[in-house]
Amino acid sequence: MRHLLNPLDFSVEEISQLLDLASDIEHHLPKYAHVCDGKKIATLFYEPSTRTRLSFESAMLSLGGSVLGFSSADSSSAAKGESVADTIRMISCYADICAMRHPKEGAPLVAANHSSIPVINAGDGGHQHPTQTLTDLMTIRSLLGRLNGMTVGLCGDLKFGRTVHSLINALVRYPDIRFILISPPELRVPEYIREDVLKAKNIEFKEADNLDEAMPELDILYMTRVQRERFFNEEDYIRLKDCYILDKAKMKLARETMFVLHPLPRVNEISVEVDSDPRAAYFRQVQYGVYVRMALIMTLLEVEKPC
């Protein structure tokens, strides 16, 4: 039995196989409609979510399985003080696989240590978000045809953004990757990412605070929102929340072959006028997320690929 808690839990070769399966699902969806008949996924979401939770549920339903779970801690026994360990022991009696989002870093690891079913980390605090990373990798590979030899701009909240941390950890395993880290000083990437990942692996990167200057260099621009829920001080959030807004004027500075990604939800960091630009890929990214999670569920449940 395997879990997915961190993007590095799968090797580069295993990720390639997973993305190949997701691509086959994309192009031959009907043949996968019953591969998980009789299987159940439990979605344990201690934090609010729209895309990730519904994406998991859509994925399992598209495979022929069924769904149970809760969408907030208040609607679960966590409100009564039940521990994550006890919750997962109980859920293991009801479901075949579990997707968990939790505000505390490491909670999915605790669950995995007490679970008799595969556990998927659907986001833990500001730590990791591996299924979003798999979605990002599929999106980039589908758009550019490769996962190597590119300059990736990461813009916005790089301090608390778990999607950013996960994506950096995943992409540094591919050759010729360069990062431009665009944020205000208060929201720079954490020191452990800078020192233990980027510098330790001799990855080329630079930190910048000007999005306009970085635009012409990018193959991928990964926008993120400034996350109100990660701030202790409302004044700091208000001061920083509009520090970068991508609009048509900025898009004119970019290459015709550059694509914009965003893990969503957006607030106002991408103007709606950008949505009609063919380089805006964030809603395609959402659709890829369903295919990736279908492939991941099949992989962790050891479901055979249909002929």
Image (cartoon, helix red, strand yellow):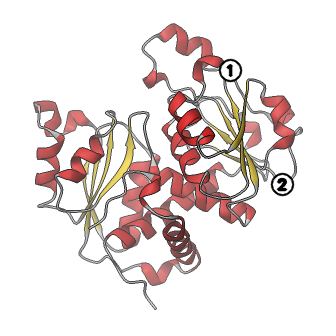
At x 36%, y 58%, the residue is 57
Please provide percent x and percent y for residue 187. Answer: 59, 23
Give the side of residue 113 with respect to residue 301, left or right: left
Q: Nearer the viewer, residue 112 or 194?
A: 194
Q: Nearer the viewer, residue 16 or 206?
A: 206
| Image quadrant where residue 197 sits | top right
Tag 2, which secondary structure?
Answer: loop
Tag 1, which secondary structure?
Answer: loop
In the rendered structure, which amino acid carries the disc numbered 2? Thr
At x 83%, y 30%, the residue is 212
Q: Which mark is residue 243?
A: 1
Give the side of residue 135 with respect to residue 37, left or right: right
Please provide percent x and percent y for residue 79. Answer: 16, 31
In the rendered structure, which amino acid carries the disc numbered 1? Cys
Residue at the disc numbered 2: 257
Could you tell me if residue 251 is visible in this image?
no
Q: Residues within 10 Å of mark 1 (few under 14, many from 20)?
A: some
Please provide percent x and percent y for residue 306. Answer: 43, 87
In space, the residues marked 2 and 1 are separated at their CA atoms by: 25 Å
| Image quadrant where residue 81 sits | top left
Q: Is residue 212 above or below residue 277?
A: above
Q: Which mark is residue 287?
A: none
Could you tell me if residue 247 is visible in this image?
yes
Q: Of callouts 2 and 1, which one flags the residue occurring earlier in the amino acid sequence?
A: 1
